[in-house]
Image: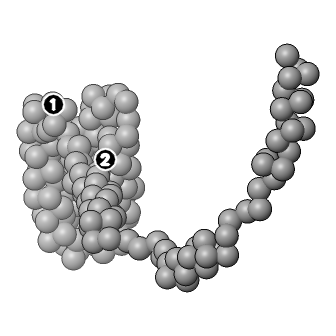
Amino acid sequence: MSNKLEGFVRDNKREFEVKGPSDALWSKIEAELDKKKPAKKTFRMYQWMSIAAMLLLTVGVYFGYQYQKTSTEILVADINPGMGKKEVRFTSLIEEKRDSLQTLAGADPELYKQFIADMSKLDNDYQELKKQLQTSPNKGLVGKAMMKNLEIQLQMISQQLYIINQVNQYKKEEKTI
């Protein structure tokens, strides 16, 4: 079988040799190539719109998450409504007693400064507990610590008012003697 194939190729060798495309065909191909310019990669309107929509969506999600993150501050009342009521009552009593302390402070400003320094320490501790409440896994325990801090502040300011009243009473008694 291979001998027949070899014989056929030998006999018809001239017919297998191809000259190539004719000159007329080459000139047509060249003319078509000159007409077609390299295609630019263009963005159509829908592609620009889809890019803008994705960008807008990404920015919207980011700012939405940031807003939610900042506006969801956890309060003591969120953990336990009873503690929330206690917090309101303690803070209002503390503010009332601070006002009373400030009016009585004119008699002994040095003593008042010392009292305010002590109260500032407790208030700073309370603010720190408030920050911890946002991230703590045991929010109930932090809430109880906050209530204890307010209770200590109230006791301290009541004690300070008592001391100022005792000092003022002692000064009055001294004047009468």
Residue 94 shows in this picture: yes
- Disc 2 target residue: 130
Q: Which of 121/138 is in front?
A: 138
Residue 39 percent coordinates (x, y): 49, 74
Asked if 125 appears above or below 81 in the picture, the reply is below
Q: From the viewer's perspective, is 13 left or right of 152?
A: right
Query: Which quarter of the image is occupied by the N terminus?
Result: top right
Circle 1 is placed at which residue position? 80
Q: Which residue lies at the image location 78% right of the left edge and 48% below the top edge? A: 15
Kindly report the distance in space between the C-alpha atoms of the residues bearing marks 2 and 1. 14 Å
Which residue sits furthest front?
11
Report the coloring of the rendering. one colour
Q: Camera-side residue: 54 or 116?
A: 54
Query: Toward which corner of the image does residue 110 lie, by quadrant?
Result: bottom left
Which quarter of the rendering shows the C terminus? bottom left
- Closer to the camera, 147 or 163? 147
CB under 8 Å between callouts 2 and 1?
Answer: no
Which x, y percent locates residue 36?
50, 78
Towards the viewer: 67 or 86: 67
Residue sitting at x 24%, y 51%: 68
Label 1 sits on a secondary structure element that is loop
